[in-house]
Amino acid sequence: KIKGRFQMTYEIKKYGEQVLKKKAEPVTEFGEGLKKIFDDMLETMYSFNGVGLAANQVGILKQMIVIDTAKEENRVILRLANPVVTSVSKEKVTYEEGCLSFPGIFEKIDRPSKITVEAQDPEGNKIKIEAEDFLAIVLQHEIDHLNGVVFIDRMSPARRIMHGKELKELKTETKNRIKDK
Ligand code: ZN
């Protein structure tokens, strides 16, 4: 008998795939099955050195995100179902963001520096998170994914134009990959 859980990694959906533009459905069933998906999402994220991942990015249209701020002083690991931003500060902060669905593209984005998020843990318990700076940014980036919003949608038009060529190439790559399947 094999003991322990085996971990699997998902394929990451890239820019050009429709699932990144779709809204995720609320999670209604909690428990072991859900925990396994969260753990596999974390494993996938670690394998690409990411700090956050939303379920849309692995082709699952459920409101689920994982975060591990490993490089920060206060390490936070989160597995959140149905996360919603319930308040934001007026004060903004700028971070250079990247996204596993947009390999090679990095850009400065302005977002509120402090936020409150209400969500549920993998058991379905309600939780409230007060986050600021880096954690607040990662949370907003991942929650955006659940609403079909990606970080290039948050770029200023000028900066988005600057990345025009890279984005076009990435989209073509994705199209060719889907076609080959
Ligand atoms: Zn992302």
Image (cartoon, rainbow, N blue to C red):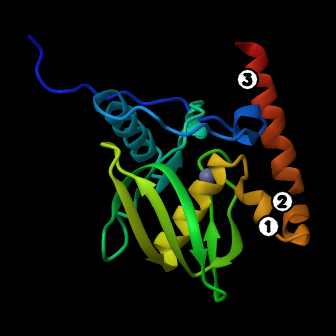
Is residue 103 in view from this perspective?
no
What number is the disc on residue 163?
Answer: 2
Rendered image quadrant of residue 141: bottom right
Q: Is residue 75 left or right of residue 146?
A: left
| SS category of the residue bearing label 3 | helix
- The amino acid type of the residue labelled 1 equals Met
Kindly report the distance in space between the C-alpha atoms of the residues bearing marks 2 and 3.
21 Å
**Residue 16: where, in percent of width, then height?**
79, 36
**Residue 83: where, in percent of width, then height?**
51, 54
Please report whichever mark, 2 or 1, sits nearer to the chain's N-terminal start: 1
Please report whichever mark, 2 or 3, sits nearer to the chain's N-terminal start: 2
**Residue 28: where, in percent of width, then height?**
46, 35
Mark 2: C-beta under 8 Å from nearest atom of ligand 1: no
Dots 2, 3 in contact, CB < 8 A: no
In the foreground, 102 or 143: 143
In the foreground, 86 or 44: 86
Residue at 34% over, 27% down? 33
What number is the disc on residue 155?
Answer: 1
What number is the disc on residue 181?
Answer: none
Which residue is labeled 3 in the image? 177
Q: Relative to 114, is 174 above or below?
A: above
Mark 3: C-beta under 8 Å from nearest atom of ligand 1: no
Q: Relative to 148, is 85 above or below?
A: below
Dots 3, 1 in contact, CB < 8 A: no
- The amino acid type of the residue labelled 2 equals His
**Residue 109: where, in percent of width, then height?**
70, 72
